[in-house]
Amino acid sequence: MPLRSVFTVPNVITLVRIAALPYFVLLMADGRVVAGSWFFGLLAFTDWIDGYIARRFNQVSEFGKVLDPVADRLIFFVGIGTVMYFNFFPAWLGIVILVREVAIAVLMVGATALGMERFPVTKMGKQAAFGLMCAVPWITIGTAGGWWTLFAYAGWIVAVPGVLFSYVSFVRYLPVVRANMSSGRRA
């Protein structure tokens, strides 16, 4: 794989997102809930930015197709795990979100190892990810109290459909994975 296809602008943004995760953990460990929540939101929002740049400027790469979902899962796992650990986020909701993330990660890695052809994320999957990437920092920032509590309400408004969409999209991926495994083996 040529280095120029690895070090594209979107891939560098994705690598920076991953490298910034320890700073997020430090913010939360220091009790800086507001700053940490905004930082988590920034990490989540840059997922859209790197994807937009990749598509808009024809910088989509095979490396990026693998790296971006890995970064998304890391941000979810580290982010949710951290806010749950410091009691800034309901553990039960974090577990519900992470169970689906583990299931989709295992499914995709396993199916890819067995020869599945890659396929794009569905619209519902993107909507679910967007909703949850908003819900987690909003619910978290609501624990700061005061007028920040308004964010918690907004977080719950997007968390419920976000979780629902994430599980529905997972179920809908199953036949697609199966079909792409069959076509991948034939190829």
Image (spheres, rainbow, N blue to C red):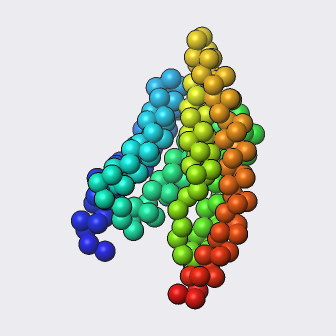
Q: Which residue is located at x 49 percent, y 36 percent?
A: 40
Q: Where is residue 85 in the image (x, y as percent from the top left)?
A: 63, 38
List the single residue furthest toward the top. Answer: 146
| Rendered view: 56 above or below 185 | above
Looking at the image, is 49 positioned above or below residue 70?
Answer: above
Q: In this view, does 125 lie above or below 157?
A: below
Which residue occupies the extreme right position in the image? 92
**In the image, what residue occupies the spot 63% across and 29% down?**
155
- Left or right side of 60 for 39: right
- Residue at 58% x, 69% y is 109
Q: Using the rendered image of the protein, determine whether residue 12 is visible from the camera's viewpoint.
A: no
Q: In this view, does 73 lie to the left or right of 171?
A: left
Residue 72 can be seen in this image: yes
Q: Looking at the rendering, in which quadrant would you find the N terminus?
A: bottom left
Residue drawn 67% across and 36% down? 159
Looking at the rendering, which quadrant does residue 150 occupy?
A: top right
Question: How many numbered marks have been drawn onto this rendered protein structure?
Answer: 0
Residue in the foreground of this view, choosing between 104 and 34: 104
Residue 133 position within the rendered picture, expressed as x and y whole percent measured from the top left = 56, 39
Q: Residue furthest left?
A: 4
Residue 20 locus on image (x, y percent)? 40, 43
The image shows residue 34 at horizontal and vertical percentages of 50, 23
